[in-house]
Image (spheres, helix red, strand yellow):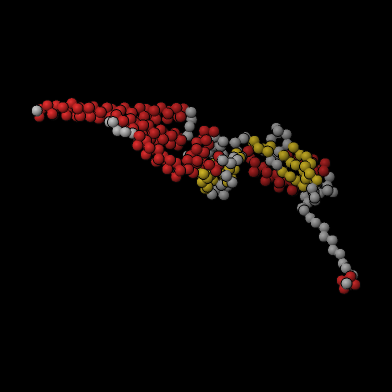
């Protein structure tokens, strides 16, 4: 009798449970192996596409975590566990985490877009999110920049990607825009000839495109001339500074004035009788 009971328990409970446990273990082991294979394949694919290493690692971690959850749920189902409540817990946890990390997820999404579309690269000088500086590093959640006075600034990626990005050094050449004022009594033709000589004698100024010199505006106290030469981007600030100095010295030596805003003050005197009234 006892042997029959033991055989019945063995056949009804222990053997099916043992099979389910073995199947669950097999599902987990095989599932984890497939997950690792998928992560490695995605990483190789992203590496071939020249995707940033930090993005590859972060994406690999997310894929691995998602596949691990799927494997665990499949293993629990193999054991006969009702996974509906487990999925509900994961969904609620995911919602709570998503709400708590809303800003971080926004920065992450912006970081991914910056890395994929590459509006700027490390080493380039940009103006973005109200900051002008050289890009030191493009990270998943923020971008590290260094200003001209050697300050290190960390800018959230969402602030950069959500606004206007001005890349100051991505092009090989750049135009210098100067406005030079001369007096109304000065000879415009002479001033233009002096400016043409200055530009033609500067080896750092490119011949193509041709520099432009033109009358821009008749101002309140000066005739404004637009001076627009092209230079290599790396020479921009040096040439700009040298040009301003050379133009000032050349105009001074040739009797061309560079006026400054001024006003005429007229004073009227009243008679004593008018003051008494």
Q: Nearer the viewer, residue 239 or 64?
A: 64
**The N terminus is located in which quarter?**
top left
The residue lying at 56 percent from left, 47 percent from top is 147
Position of residue 90 in the picture relative to residue 102 (left or right): left
Residue at (23% x, 29% y) in the render: 17
Q: Is residue 137 visible?
A: no
* Residue 127, position as x, y percentages in the image: 59, 43
* Residue at image point 53% right, 42% down: 158
Q: Is residue 58 above or below residue 261?
A: above
Compared to 224, does 41 lie above or below? above
Quarter assignment of residue 93: top left
Q: Position of residue 23 (x, y in %)?
A: 27, 27
Tell me if 158 is positioned left or right of 269 in this view. Answer: left
Q: Establish if 52 lies above or below 270.
A: above
Q: Inspect this view and state whether residue 199 appears.
A: yes
Q: Quadrant of residue 3?
A: top left
Image location (x, y in percent) of residue 90: 38, 38
Q: On screen, 144 above or below 269?
A: above
Residue 184: x, y in percent? Answer: 83, 48
At a point 43% along the width and 40% down the height, the residue shown is 95
Q: Nearer the viewer, residue 177 or 245?
A: 177
Looking at the image, residue 211 sits to the left or right of residue 53; the answer is: right
Total marks in image: 0
State left or right for residue 274 relative to residue 30. right
Residue positioned most to the bottom: 276
Residue sitting at the far left = 1
Q: Quadrant of the C terminus?
A: bottom right
Along the viewing direction, whichever of 253 and 138 lies nearer the viewer: 138
């Amino acid at each position: 009798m006892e042997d029959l009971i033991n055989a019945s328990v063995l056949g009804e409970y222990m053997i099916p449970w043992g099979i389910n446990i073995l199947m669950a273990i097999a599902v987990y082991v095989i599932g984890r192996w497939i997950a690792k294979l998928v992560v490695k394949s995605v990483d190789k694919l992203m590496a071939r596409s020249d995707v940033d290493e930090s993005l590859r690692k972060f994406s690999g971690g997310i894929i691995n975590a998602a596949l691990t959850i799927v494997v665990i749920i499949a293993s629990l189902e193999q054991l006969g566990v009702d996974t509906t409540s487990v999925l509900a817990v994961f969904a609620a946890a995911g919602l709570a985490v998503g709400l708590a990390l809303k800003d971080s997820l926004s920065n992450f999404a912006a970081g991914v877009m910056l890395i994929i579309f590459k509006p700027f690269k490390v080493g380039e000088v940009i103006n973005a999110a109200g900051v002008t500086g050289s890009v030191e590093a493009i990270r998943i959640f923020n971008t590290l920049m260094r200003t001209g006075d050697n300050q290190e600034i960390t800018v959230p990626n969402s602030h950069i990607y959500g606004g206007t990005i001005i890349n100051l050094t991505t092009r090989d050449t750049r135009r210098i825009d100067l406005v030079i004022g001369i007096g109304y009594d000065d000879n415009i033709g002479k001033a233009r000839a002096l400016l043409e000589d200055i530009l033609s004698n500067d080896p750092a100024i490119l011949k193509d495109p041709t520099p432009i010199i033109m009358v821009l505006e008749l101002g309140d106290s000066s005739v404004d001339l637009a001076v627009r030469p092209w230079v290599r981007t790396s020479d921009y600030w040096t040439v700009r500074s040298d040009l301003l100095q050379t133009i000032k010295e050349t105009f001074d030596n040739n009797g061309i004035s560079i006026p400054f805003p001024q006003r005429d003050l007229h004073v009227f005197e009243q008679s004593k009788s008018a003051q008494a009234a």
